[in-house]
Amino acid sequence: MAEVKLHGFWPSPFLHRVIWALKIKGVDYEYIEEDLSNKSEQLLKYNPVYKKIPVLVHGGKPISESLIILEYIEETWPENPLLPTEPYEKAMARFWIQYGLDKAAVYRAILQATGGEEKEKAAKEFSEVLKTVEEKALGDKKFFGGDTINLVDITYGVVAYWFKNMQEVIGVEVLEPKSLPRLCRWAENFLQVPVIKENLPDRDKMLVYMRAMREKIVAAKLGN
């Protein structure tokens, strides 16, 4: 098998999407931690356009952007499939993955909100996005993939762990049982899947990182 390397930064949910997929597929890889304040020559070489992580290098060939990497992993290692085989179901899975990507600005708005009114507005908008996901994509299923997780679950993992913890840092409540009961149950189930549970960043360490990041965002915004 060709050598597989993964360049990442430990708190990144986009990195962990790739880690989960590789673990589920049983792919051995070498992990390379990047210092994003002093990016390595390798990272700049492998992702000269965006200069970001994650980057998967397979047999010397680099692939960047987490969703593209996930598709590559699915096609390259078909064992333990993460997309449905039936064409319509596969199309629907890709639709909801794209929906999450399209709503990234709504997610970022919460991270960047400062005043109470701005937080409330951003939280309401994101809640509406999650309600759509809960009602139209998840429904009464345990996972988006049914009884087992698939690529939709993996891509929404940022909500289950990172956003759930970020709420504490920002001081908002969006993902909570009263308003999003099925999505909250999904998040609990998802985080108990062994391959997910065993491959998450340390919560305390991540909260420290999140608070520092949040302070920088607020300071930059107020400075403008």
Image (cartoon, rainbow, N blue to C red):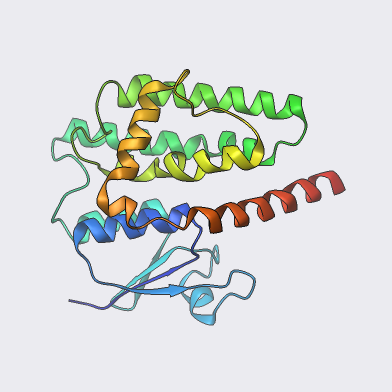
Q: Is residue 8 visible?
A: yes
**Picture quadrant where residue 27 is located:** bottom left
Residue occupying image coordinates x 22% and y 37%: 90
Figure check: 5 above or below 219: below
Judge from the rendering whether residue 7 lies leftward or rightward of residue 21; answer left or right. right
Q: Is residue 224 visible?
A: no
Judge from the rendering whether residue 20 lies leftward or rightward of residue 7; answer left or right. left
Q: Quadrant location of the N terminus? A: bottom left
Comparing 123 with 84, the one in front is: 123
- Outermost residue on the bottom side: it is 41
Q: How many marks?
A: 0
Where is residue 177? Give x, y as percent: 44, 23
- Outermost residue on the front side: it is 204
Where is residue 104? Give x, y as percent: 53, 39
Comparing 224 with 157, the one in front is: 157
Comparing 201 with 119, the one in front is: 201
Figure check: 202 above or below 107: below
Where is residue 78? Give x, y as percent: 15, 56
Judge from the rendering whether residue 83 lies leftward or rightward of residue 32; answer left or right. left
Comparing 74 with 17, the one in front is: 17
Where is residue 17? Give x, y as percent: 37, 53
Residue occupying image coordinates x 46% and y 27%: 130
Figure check: 49 above or below 150: below
